[in-house]
Amino acid sequence: IEILSSDAVKGNAAKYLPSFAQKAGSSLAQLRSSAANLPQQRVAEFLRVQGQHLNSRMLSTLAVRVAEDPFAKVKTMIKDLIMRLQEEATEEAEHKGWCDTELSTNE
């Protein structure tokens, strides 16, 4: 607390901290996801309009499927894999601790 309230540090927050704050706008991940989904959204909208125009249930169904996230299942599988790997790493760390304890008691 003394360091933060000293004269050497006073006023530097106004100078340096605003550069660390996130500016209004989108993050890189948001830009990638919206840019990647733009063609998909355009195709879905086109199919929806054509399905209504032609009164086609098949096109309307296809529009709904195209609008959905095609990688949802893959994302779920990756998250599950990461969780399993973390659990496995925890188990291995516990086992190593047990082995280290047994080795030190046997010596």
Image (spheres, rainbow, N blue to C red):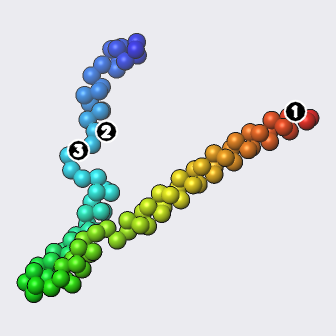
Q: Decide: is 13 above or below 100.
A: above
Expressed as whole percent of the image width and height from the top left, the position of residue 26 reads 24, 53
Q: Nearer the viewer, residue 28 or 68?
A: 68
Q: In terms of secondary structure, where does tag 3 sit? A: loop
The numbered mark at residue 23 is 3
Expressed as whole percent of the image width and height from the top left, the position of residue 102 reads 84, 37
Mark 1 or 3, which is nearer the eye?
1
The span from disc 3 to disc 2 (Cα, nearest Å) is 9 Å
How many marks do you count on the picture? Answer: 3
Mark 1 or 2, which is nearer the eye?
1
How many residues crowd mark 3 within 10 Å: few (<14), some (14–19), many (20+)? Answer: few
Q: Residue at x 23, y 44 (%)?
A: 23
Quarter holding residue 13: top left
The numbered mark at residue 2 is none
Q: Are marks 1 and 2 in contact (CB under 8 Å)?
A: no
Q: Is residue 60 at all visible to an observer of this figure?
A: yes
Q: Which quarter of the rendered picture does the C terminus lie within?
A: top right
Residue type of the residue flagged with mark 3: Lys
Q: In terms of secondary structure, where does tag 2 sit? A: loop
Residue type of the residue flagged with mark 2: Phe
On the image, numbered disc 1 is attached to which residue? 105
Quarter holding residue 66: bottom left
On the image, numbered disc 2 is attached to which residue? 20
